Amino acid sequence: MQPKNTGEEFPEDLAIEGHKELIKGLVDVNLIQKKQPTVVVDCNGAGSVISPYLLRELGCKVLSLNSEGTGFNRPSEPNEKNLQDLMRIVKSTGADLGIAHDGDADRAVVVDETGLILPLDTQLAIMIENELQLSKNKKVVSTVEASLMIRDVVEKNNGSIEITPVGSANLSEKLESENASFGGEPCGEYVFEKGVHVPDGVLTGAKFVEIFCRNGRLSQMKEKYISHFMLREKFRCEGKDKYVLV
């Protein structure tokens, strides 16, 4: 739904249902329904109102954590320190994978069936390869922070890659200007050509469920991606200086 006039406000009561239907059109629902994977979802915020419900509608058996939607039950950052409960429950229940969102659910971090978080560079490489194999559009976008691993994946799949400064806004702009099929950065923010052109952790989670259903255990799948040595550091500087330094 679009406003008729600039500045017009209107309620959108069907936003969640509409987004679920969009995502269902971007994954192989029949495949997921056939496999019926068990997925543990750590919602912890906005994802509570859509992510576990969507996955159930796709045919998954879902265990949800921190899904009350009334606040944050863990720190928002979906990292190893904050995802201990998810990692433990995925392993103890024999689930096929786990998915964790940040507070606004624009990110998704994936846990394999052994209870280990996928290395974020590997997670990005897996998604890039998935999109290149499924799309006729062989152009993708990532940021300067990404590992050289993703360039290996792009080359292997006869694709091309555009590199931007860090930040999802840069990804989205470049995806649109270059008509790319996918844009992603290592933090777990992914933008899809046929999605909403902003980072979408809910779609990312559904895509990883589909990837599991098509390829099997993520713990085995991740082993084929060769890491490059990389050191990430943060340096404090004045806002006006950061672009000059980078």
Image (spheres, rainbow, N blue to C red):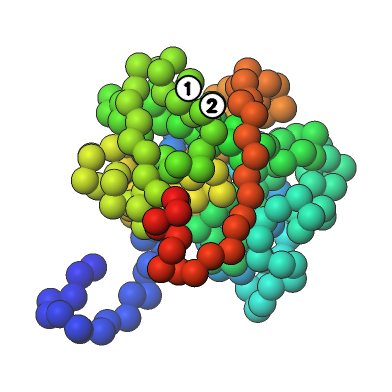
Q: Quadrant of the N terminus?
A: bottom left
Q: Position of residue 149 (x, y in %)?
A: 54, 26
Q: Give the residue at x 80% y 34%.
A: 114
Label 2 residue SS: helix
Q: Nearer the viewer, residue 151 or 128?
A: 151
Q: Give the residue at x 51% y 28%.
A: 148
Q: Position of residue 221 (x, y in %)?
A: 64, 23
Tell me the amino acid under the disc marked 1. Val
Dot 1 crowding, Cα within 10 Å, few <14, some 14–19, many 20+: some
Q: Residue furthest right?
A: 92
Question: In the rendered image, which quarter is residue 229 located in?
Answer: top right
Which residue matches tag 2? Answer: 149
Query: Relative to residue 205, is residue 149 depicted above or below?
Result: above
Q: Position of residue 230 (x, y in %)?
A: 63, 34
Query: Relative to residue 120, is residue 155 depicted above or below?
Result: above
Residues at badges 1 and 2 in contact (C-beta under 8 Å)? yes
Tell me the amino acid under the disc marked 2. Met
Of discs 1 and 2, which sits in the foreground? 2
Q: Is residue 2 left or right of residue 211?
A: left
Label 1 residue SS: helix
Q: Give the residue at x 37% y 75%.
A: 13
Q: Is residue 8 left or right of residue 25?
A: left
Which residue matches tag 1? Answer: 153
Q: Nearer the viewer, residue 15 or 125?
A: 125
Residue 190 visible in the displayed image = yes
Give the Cα distance between marks 1 and 2: 6 Å
